[in-house]
Amino acid sequence: MYSLHIPKMSCGGCLGTVTRAIAAVDPQARVEGDLERRIVRVETSASEATLLAALKECGYPAAPLHPAVN
């Protein structure tokens, strides 16, 4: 599971866009969003680099979080 900080994600519409971008690279991915903290947790078979590239491409650049932040 990956935890990613997405600074630009501020509303449900943003979360929907992020979720669709992740689903485009792995339709089986499970995404949990925390809008207040601007974090998504993703259970996926895709690599972290693939997720980060997909999010950057859709306008929501992300950064991996250290496990202690979860």
Image (cartoon, grey):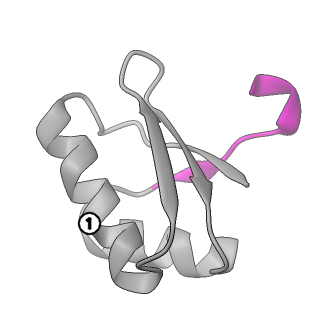
Q: Which residue is mark 1?
A: 20
The question of residue 27 being in magenta is answered with no
Residue 68 to residue 7: above or below: above
Q: Is residue 20 left or right of residue 2?
A: left
* Occupied quadrant, residue 59: bottom left
Q: Position of residue 40 (x, y in %)?
A: 50, 42
The extreme top residue here reads 36
Label total for image? 1
Q: Quadrant of the C terminus?
A: top right
Q: Position of residue 31 (x, y in %)?
A: 47, 51
Disc 1 packing (10 Å; few <14; some 14–19; many ≥20) = some
Q: Is residue 56 left or right of residue 12?
A: right
Q: Is residue 38 left or right of residue 41?
A: left
Nearest to the observer: residue 51 or residue 19: 19
* Occupied quadrant, residue 33: top left
Q: Position of residue 26 (x, y in %)?
A: 47, 80
The extreme right residue here reads 68
The question of residue 67 being in magenta is answered with yes
**What residue span does the magenta drawing correspond to?**
62-70
Q: Secondary structure at mark 1?
A: helix
* Residue under the image location 27 percent in, 43 percent down: 15
* Residue under the image location 41 percent in, 57 percent down: 61
Q: Quadrant of the N terminus?
A: bottom right
Nearest to the observer: residue 26 or residue 68: 26
